[in-house]
Image (cartoon, rainbow, N blue to C red):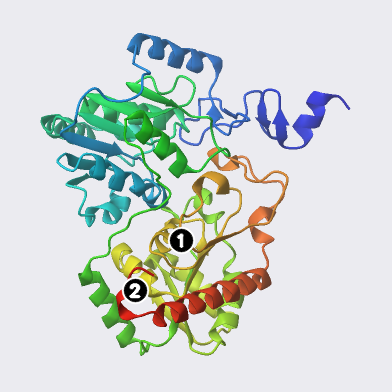
Amino acid sequence: MNESRAHRERPGPSRRGWWHPQATAWGCTSKHTPNLRLRVAPSGWVETSPPVEAGFRALSLLARKRTCHGLPFSPKSIGILRTGFIGDVILTTGMIRHVKDRYPQARLHYFCYSSARPIIEDNPRVDRVWSPSWLPLRRLGGLLRLEVFREMRAFMREARRERIDLLLVPCRQQTLLGTLKVALVVWMIQPGTSVGLCYRNRGFFLDIKVPDEGLLVRHESDWCADILRAAGIPGDCRVPCIEVHPQHERSVSRLLESHGIRPNERLVIIHPGGGSDASEPKWTLKRWPAANFARVAGELARMDGVRVLVTGVEAERPLFQEMTARGIAGVTDLIGRTSLKEFSALARRAALVIGNDSGATHVAAACGAPTIALFGYTDFIGYHPLGARVSLLRHATECAPCLYWFGRVPCQKSYSCLRSVRPEQVVAEARRLMAAHSAELRAALSLPKGRRRSA
């Protein structure tokens, strides 16, 4: 068997990229741009055909952007642009603290999707949150509608009136449309200086380019720290920052009282869903089976002083119904009862949070709750939740993490990287984290009152 035939029979790295047996000469076809031939490089990025890459190189040469480090001025208005979902935005919140500490008099703007807006808008360091309705659009046709064009024009005029001096862009150029959309937003804002990640020549729209080595290399927060250093703002971004308003704390207290949950009970939150669109296989394939969550909930509900809560949005109620069909008892249904901000307040009280690779586990970890995150084919190296007590559970396979979800190529191993994680493993890890959390609480209560806050 020759080398090329072997690479086409089994997914794996070749000298030209990551091939799949059902892929054509240039790999799979993008879902949103079916006429563009894509392949996944060893670095983890989706590669385009040579003419498109040549176009990126030409744009990079025409732009003639600077590659120096540091800023020659003190900015009066600073912006952070992150086109991503809840977990992606949380991983960049460490930048907010360092930017505001370095330039306390500057106005700080944050540009993100509307779904991630609740994570940022209660942060006292952020002066304004921008979440235009057209920003999450993932189809070129959606950006060409007349009403969208009018919204984009209004956004451009208002953003340019702010005269943003420095724009930090911790966006990864994963797809062609995503790269061009970020370039369009940067052009609309028209900052004095833009600093961001650049994979090959895809950061042609940036003034200061930070080299991006691709996926499966470093954590997202490390790339954010590199962007800050390039802008002359040193700092470690591995400590996320989520602010919880007292109003949401009180709302959660009333919710727990209405379900008869006592203050001395240990709360275990199980979040079986996750993902922005439950209809897309890209998100549903990231979920651990609901039957396994049911077995874990049943085991933990039998522990003394433990109350198991199941959370999620209303569209994820079929997952809870599938769990209850297994005959579990002692589980409280909070599906559709909490907003994102209230879930943050609830996670602060939890003794444990169990969920998939989703925004919920990122929120829980950032709020300081012991968290178990179940990972499958996604990049656990670069996008795992950040927190003091976070445990990642996954089944090690030779092909995971992979990036099959960029196209329509099915997994040949039935996603065993996630589905092979046994409920017994999750229960054992849950008991370990809860025991460690209880020990920390006992140690904190044994301290004098003046030292409890610092502990």
The count of marks equals 2
Q: State how far apart marks 2 and 1 are (Cα).
A: 29 Å
Amino acid type, callout 1:
Thr
SS type, badge 1: helix
Task: Let me know if residue 113 appears in the view.
Answer: no
Q: Which residue is mark 1?
A: 361
Image x and y of residue 139, in percent = 38, 35
In this rendering, the label closer to the viewer, 2 or 1: 2
Task: Give the quarter of the figure containing the C terminus.
Answer: bottom left
Amino acid type, callout 2:
Arg
Furthest residue to the left?
A: 161
* Relative to 390, 59 lies left or right: left
Image x and y of residue 386, in percent = 46, 55
SS type, badge 2: helix
* Relative to 453, 323 lies left or right: right
Image x and y of residue 142, in percent = 32, 35
**Residue at the image position 16 percent from the left and 39 percent from the top:** 106
**Residue at the image position 21 percent from the left and 50 percent from the top:** 125
Work out whether 290 lies above or below 53. Answer: below
Q: Which residue is mark 2?
A: 451
Mark with earlier residue (2, 1): 1
What is the quadrant of residue 395 in the picture? Answer: bottom right
Front in this rendered view, residue 149 or 372: 372
